[in-house]
Structures are given as structure tokens and as C-alpha cells.
Image: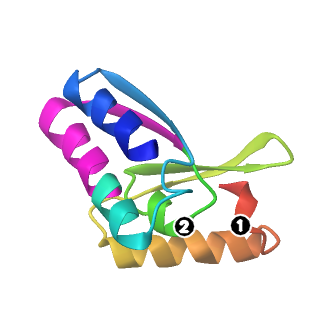
Amino acid sequence: QQRTAAARAFFHKPQIIFADEPTGALDSKSANDLLQRLEEMNKSFDTTIVMVTHDPVAASFAERVIMLKDGQIHTQLYQEGRSKQAFYEDIVHLQSVLGGVSNDI
């Protein structure tokens, strides 16, 4: 179901995609494929992706990550040319500073 919904969204090349935990029900290969496709859509078609996730790996595909704490914006991280690995490590570090819970992304 999740893959079918994603394929439908990609087919129409929308200006904006809202993705709520898009990798939640996918195996790791399918999740990675989906994240790469979202990244491609953003770069090739200038599609804005608004993704809600608890997964720092998924978040590391973004150009900007907004961290929430107690329902408020706490901070923002920008990818700024860093590798996905370096950005991922920054996201995980910030999660630990915010209290070590992964549901604040």
C-alpha cells in the first residue's frame, strides 16, 4: 500500500509532497529506495517534501530538519553540503542532547 501511494504521488510530479512516516512500514531496501526517489523529486522537479519522521536516517536525506520538543520548534539543522553520514550523526547527537528520545524529529 505504501509503495503504491508513493508511486501515485511521483507520477503526477506535484509541487509539494506531504510524507507522514513514509518509511515506517517498509523494509530497509524499499525505505532507502523511497528516500532516494524523494530526494530525486526534490532536486529534479523542485518538489518540496514535508516529511514527519522519527527516523534519523530518513531525516538525513533532508536539506533541513526541524526538531520539535514539547510541541514547539526547538531548533533547526541544515545539511549545508555535509555528507548524509555527517548530517545523520549531527541529528543523532542533537536527539541525545534533547533528552535521548527519537520521537522529537
Name the side, left or right, on which 69 lies relative to 81. Answer: right
**Crowd class of label 1 (few under 14; some 14 to 19; many from 20; radius 10 Å):** some
Horizontal side, residue 97 vs residue 12: left or right: right
Residue 48 image position (x, y, % from top left): 35, 31
Q: Which residues are magenta?
A: 35-51
Mark count = 2
Residue at (43% x, 63% y) in the render? 60
Tell me the residue that label 2 is attached to. 56
Question: Tag 2: residue type?
Answer: Pro
The C terminus lies in quadrant: bottom right
Q: Is residue 17 above or below residue 75?
A: above
Circle 1 is placed at which residue position?
A: 102
Q: Residue furthest left?
A: 44
Q: Residue furthest front?
A: 1
- Where does residue 35 sit, x and y in percent of width and height? 34, 55
Residue kind at label 1, given as amino acid type: Ser
Alpha carbons under labels 1 and 2: distance apart: 8 Å
Q: Is residue 74 magenta?
A: no
| Residue 16 occupies quadrant | top left
Q: Picture quarter containing residue 32?
A: bottom left
